[in-house]
Image: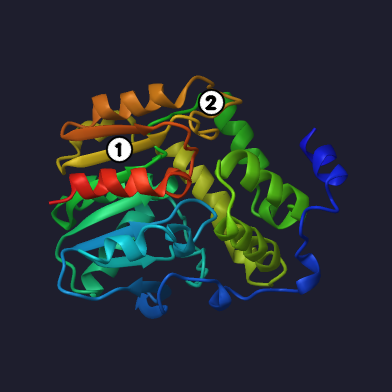
Amino acid sequence: MIPLLLSLLGGCVPGYAHLGPLEPEDLWAPLPVEHTLVRDIDIAFIDSGGEGPPIVLIHGLSSSMGFWEYQVEELAKTHRVLALDLPGYGASGRPDAPCTPSWYADVVDEWMFAQGLDRAVVMGHSMGGQVAMELALRHPERVDRLVLSAPAGIESFGPGAARFMKGFWTETRAMESSEEQVRANFQTMVFNRMDEGVERLIQERVRLGQSPRFAGTSVAISRSIAGMIDYPVGERARGITAPTLIIYGSEDRMIPNPVFNGGRPRAIAEKAHALIPHSRLVVIEGAGHTVHHDSPRAFNRAVEEFLP
């Protein structure tokens, strides 16, 4: 149905494949991009500077720091804001690495040390939320507070579902997505509110897919998905000691997984709230999986009220 609808509306939908490849270093970012080496991996990041308390932003699966468009400027009014591209994504390097949540958590820990951050508020979206929880469990001394935007890792999957998803998301699968499939995914699963920023992200994803370096991202996506499935946080979330703000959208179409688990986002949100000891839960009505984009004012207000 979705591909048919898109084909019927083809004359109204902008196309980007004809514009040619976009290289990772040309992706839009909220601030000038800096680079540093961690484990001999090139890590791209932004840093607002300033004297405010530091806050670290960790993007989700198949994303980059550009997805924090509505948070960086607002948070920088009171905080030193840093956001990184995880290895395999954005303008960072594409190493041959496991790309599990725990591996990413260790990389973020070392990157924070390299930036002179003893402690910080850590905010993660989706997969980035799972990475943030792993960071809080593995390196609790780094995490002052947690902000989890529609975090993965609370939901778990049975053996059959896990086997199917890992078999489907091969290391070349992302490279095979057409422009129509990319747009359908963004419009029906990732975002509930379309705007110029989302249109820019669609264009970037379509053109980035034409770059030879996207092969490394496709591998990272496959391994990230397998890692999230194989190592959910689940009951281990009870060990998180940092004060935690959990924010979900009431109309999240990705969590819980509509194919294998079903149910309402509020059920997963309340489960996360019950598991994490010092947590506060906010469910934003009408927002989808990228809740911090769909309802930025409500999201930013909840964060502002939570931060010291």
Quarter of the image for residue 133 reads top left
Residue situated in front as seen by the camera: 294 or 82: 294
Taking 180 as reference, is 266 left or right? left
Residue 50 in picture, x, y percent from top left: 20, 75
Q: Amino acid at mark 1?
A: Ile
Residue in the picture at 50% in, 50% down:
224
Q: Residues within 10 Å of mark 2 (few under 14, many from 20)?
A: few
Which label is found at residue 17? Answer: none
Taking 13 as reference, is 285 left or right? left
In the figure, 134 relative to 196: above or below? Answer: above
Residue 270 in picture, x, y percent from top left: 32, 24
Residue 109 in picture, x, y percent from top left: 26, 61
Residue in the picture at 52% in, 69% down:
94
Residue in the picture at 35% in, 50% down:
124
Quarter of the image for residue 75 reads bottom left
Which residue is the site of mark 1? 246
In the figure, 162 relative to 44: above or below? Answer: above
Which residue is the site of mark 2? 159
Taking 215 as reference, is 145 left or right? left
Residue 185 in picture, x, y percent from top left: 65, 44
Residue situated in front as seen by the camera: 136 or 72: 72
Q: Amino acid at mark 2?
A: Pro
